[in-house]
C-alpha cells in the first residue's frame, strides 16, 4: 500500500463509516456496492485524490496501485492506470466491485459463459464506454467482463472491492481463456455453465 492524500483518506473514512464491518453489523446493507458507489461519486472528480506516484503507468500492462485494504476485510480501494491499448483478460471477481473513471474513458465488454456441441465459449452480450466521472458496478455471479483503454491517452480509474485484495494479491477470481462469439452470431442453442464446469486459466 502507499501514502494517501488527504482527500483519499477522507474517502476511505467515509467508506468505513458506511460499509465497514462495524457499520454493516449495525444494520444489514443489502447492496453495499450501491452505497460505495455513492461515496466514490462524491470524490471522483477531485484532482487531489491521488499522488503523482499513483498516476504512474507500466509500459507492459495496466498497473494496479493498492491504496487501502480495510483490516476487517470489508473493502479495498485500488487505482488502475492504463496506457493506450492496455486491457484486462476476460475475468470475474472475488467480490462485488465499484468502478469510477477518474480520467479518460474505459471500454467495458460483458460476457456470458456458455457451451454447445463445439464446447465452452464466451458470448459477448454487451459493450459500453464508461466516460470520465461515471460510476459502474459488477456483482457476482454474472460479472464476467473485460476492460480496456480504447483511447490514445492515459486512463485512470478507481476501484472499490468488497474484499481484502491485499490478502489475496488480486481482485480476479478467475480468467476465462475461451473462444468469443458475438451474441448476434450465436445461432445454435447454448446453455449457461456453472464455474465448476469450466476449464479456466488462473
Image: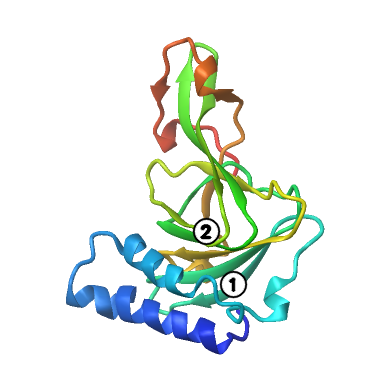
Q: Which residue is drawn at the image coordinates 67% and 81% (left, top)? A: 51
Mark 1 or mark 2, which is nearer the start of the sequence? 1
Relative placement, left or right, of 32 versus 177 is left
Occupied quadrant, residue 71: bottom left
Q: Is residue 23 above or below residue 178?
A: below
Q: Position of residue 191 (x, y in %)?
A: 39, 21
Q: Compare residues 200 and 182 and report the one nearer the observer.
A: 182
Number of numbered discs overlaid on the protein picture: 2
Q: Position of residue 197 (x, y in %)?
A: 44, 31
Q: Compare residues 197 and 63 and report the one nearer the observer.
A: 63
Relative placement, left or right, of 167 versus 47 is left
- Report which residue position mark 2 lands on: 171
Q: Position of residue 106 (x, y in %)?
A: 61, 51
Q: Compare residues 187 and 72 and report the one nearer the observer.
A: 187
Relative placement, left or right, of 154 versus 191 is right
- Report which residue position mark 1 lands on: 66
* Quadrant of the image containing the N terminus: bottom right
Label 1: few (<14), some (14–19) or many (≥20) C-alpha neighbours in 10 Å: some
Q: Compare residues 157 and 192 and report the one nearer the observer.
A: 157
Relative placement, left or right, of 113 versus 50 is left
> What label sits on residue 122 in the rendered view?
none
Check disc 1 and report its element: helix, strand or loop. strand
Q: Is residue 190 above or below residue 108?
A: above
Amino acid at each position: 500500500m502507499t501514502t494517501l492524500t488527504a482527500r483519499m483518506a477522507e474517502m476511505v473514512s467515509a467508506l468505513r463509516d458506511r460499509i465497514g464491518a462495524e457499520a454493516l453489523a449495525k444494520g444489514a446493507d443489502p447492496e453495499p456496492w450501491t452505497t460505495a458507489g455513492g461515496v466514490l461519486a462524491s470524490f471522483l472528480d477531485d484532482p487531489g485524490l491521488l499522488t503523482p506516484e499513483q498516476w504512474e503507468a507500466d509500459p507492459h500492462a495496466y498497473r494496479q496501485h493498492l491504496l487501502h485494504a480495510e483490516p476487517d476485510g470489508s473493502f479495498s480501494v485500488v487505482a488502475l492506470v492504463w496506457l493506450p491499448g492496455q486491457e484486462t483478460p476476460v475475468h470475474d471477481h472475488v467480490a462485488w466491485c465499484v468502478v469510477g473513471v477518474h480520467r479518460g474513458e474505459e471500454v467495458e465488454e460483458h460476457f456470458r459463459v456458455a457451451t454447445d456441441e463445439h464446447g465452452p465459449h464466451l458470448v459477448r452480450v454487451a459493450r459500453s464506454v464508461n466516460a470520465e466521472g461515471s460510476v459502474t458496478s459488477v456483482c457476482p455471479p454474472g460479472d464476467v467482463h473485460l476492460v480496456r483503454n480504447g483511447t490514445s491517452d492515459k486512463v485512470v480509474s478507481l476501484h472499490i472491492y468488497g474484499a481484502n485484495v491485499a490478502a489475496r494479491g488480486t481482485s480476479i477470481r478467475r480468467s476465462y481463456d475461451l473462444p468469443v462469439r458475438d451474441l448476434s452470431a450465436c445461432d445454435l442453442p447454448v446453455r449457461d455453465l456453472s464455474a465448476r464446469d469450466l476449464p479456466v486459466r488462473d
